[in-house]
Image: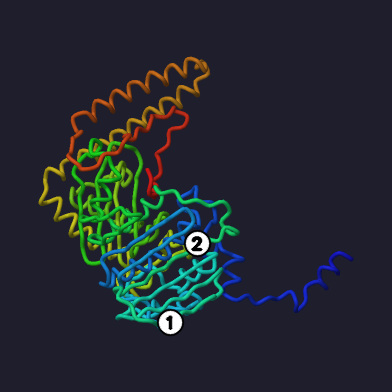
Amino acid sequence: MAENKELFNAYTEESIRSLDWREHIRLRPGMYIGKLGDGSSQDDGIYILIKEVVDNCIDEHMMGFGKQIDIKVTEHSVTVRDYGRGVPLGKVVDVVSKINTGAKYDSKAFQKSVGLNGVGTKAVNALSSYFKISSMREGRVKVAEFERGVLTKEHKETDTKDGNGTLVTFTPDDTVFKNYHFIPDFLENQIWNYCFLNAGLTIHFNGQKYLSKNGLLDLLQRKTNPDDLRYPIIHLKGEDIEVAITHENQYGEEYYSFVNGQHTTQGGTHLAAFREAFVKTIRDFYKKDYDATDIRASICAAIAVRVQEPVFESQTKTKLGSLTVSEGGQSMKAFVLEFLSKQLDDYLHRNPTIAESLKKRIEQSERERKELAGIKKLANERAKRPTCTTASCATAASTLMKKLQASIKTSRRPNRRKLPSSSRRATPRAVPLQSPATWRHKPYSVSAVNR
């Protein structure tokens, strides 16, 4: 009782604190950038800092301003330069130091942007030991410098010969990100995703040029092994939506999903809509009620959509929660279904060879699923027999496995097609068959950038 009384008395008006924006970000950084980490994982905070700055550059490009972004990353410093409109000079300090301040509350200025909450660059500023922003706009430049979110120097506007755009330099705070280091491969994957989603955008990263001309088609070509493809990649584009689809020889499902240029590694409503719409479109095209797992088995696909006022589950924006593509507009489910049911159906009618290859892959998955189910059932029945010893059951299961492997190998050989491609994966994927006791259908996965 005495202890409870002490705790009760300890809770007073002095216990209630009001933090300013900078203090809150530094006290609870996970709310803004996810986990901290040291850079050894591709979702560590130091990569999110870079993404928050580059996302603003991408938004400028999406609005039609700036076709080039320059990124330089050294051991402990990051510099990002875009060639967009530049931040209005009178608001340069505010946009990086006043929470809930930004132009993205106005859908006319940024109709389908990634950043919506006015938080991104403020978090970068607060979590950097040094942060500098320069805005070039119509021959004038404004510069401001910060340390851990505190303004240290605000330069007066001056004339400049540099083109319009914004330049940001920052150094992550090593008191927050302990012993951090950048891994170039992680950064390169981020940059390639930006290029795949913004065909025609040029990004210079540490002196190297990155450019994609074919969008998601280039992405799947980079992520797949051409020897494993069952048919050429199907690439479809429409207003505010783009998809690329193929099937391989592996098991399971693999997806790359994006919203307004953001890689949604955990999927969301757009990916759920795609998976459902793809099944319905295939059933309608072949006029057969194939099992959904057989239609999607071995699929490798990418989908990118543009959404007004997207709703994400967190500031890190890894999963989309939007139910509609715009306020009061079409539902995400109807939007994706309408696109696929027309565009994919038309494509398959115009390409009967690809349609036949896809059908064979679906029917092969159906046969393999039924064979696995039959062998599993037989193995379970034999295991229940009183005369079945552990050794005899294992021998029987092994024999059945060998027969199944031979059957699958034979059924696959005639359907494999060697396709030309500019990129090859170093090591083709191989998924071994499991023992009867552990047979399960592999659930679909929303793949990370690396495979």
Give the residue drawn at x 41%, y 79%.
142
Give amino acid for label 2.
Thr
Indicate the position of residue 352 as horizontal and vertical percent values.
11, 46
Q: Is residue 429 left or right of residue 176?
A: left
Mark linked to residue 91: 1
Q: Is residue 246 above or below residue 263?
A: above
Quickly name the residue at label 2. Answer: 171
Q: Quadrant of residue 239?
A: bottom left
- Looking at the rendered image, the quarter that the C terminus falls into is top left
Q: Quadrant of residue 35?
A: bottom right
The image position of residue 266, as x and y in percent, is 42, 55
- In the picture as drawn, the residue positioned furthest to the right comes out as 2
Q: Percent from the top left, x then y, of residue 106?
A: 37, 81
Task: Note whether 266 is above or below 55 in the view shown.
Answer: above
What quarter of the picture does the N terminus occupy?
Answer: bottom right
Query: What residue is shown at x 38% (from left), y 49% (from top)?
Result: 449
At label 1, counting other C-alpha atoms closer than 10 Å, the crowd grade (few under 14, some 14-19, many 20 or more) is few
Q: Disc 1 vs disc 2: Cβ atoms closer than 8 Å?
A: no
Tell me what residue is drawn at x 24 percent, y 25 percent.
410
| N-terminal-most mark, 1 or 2 | 1
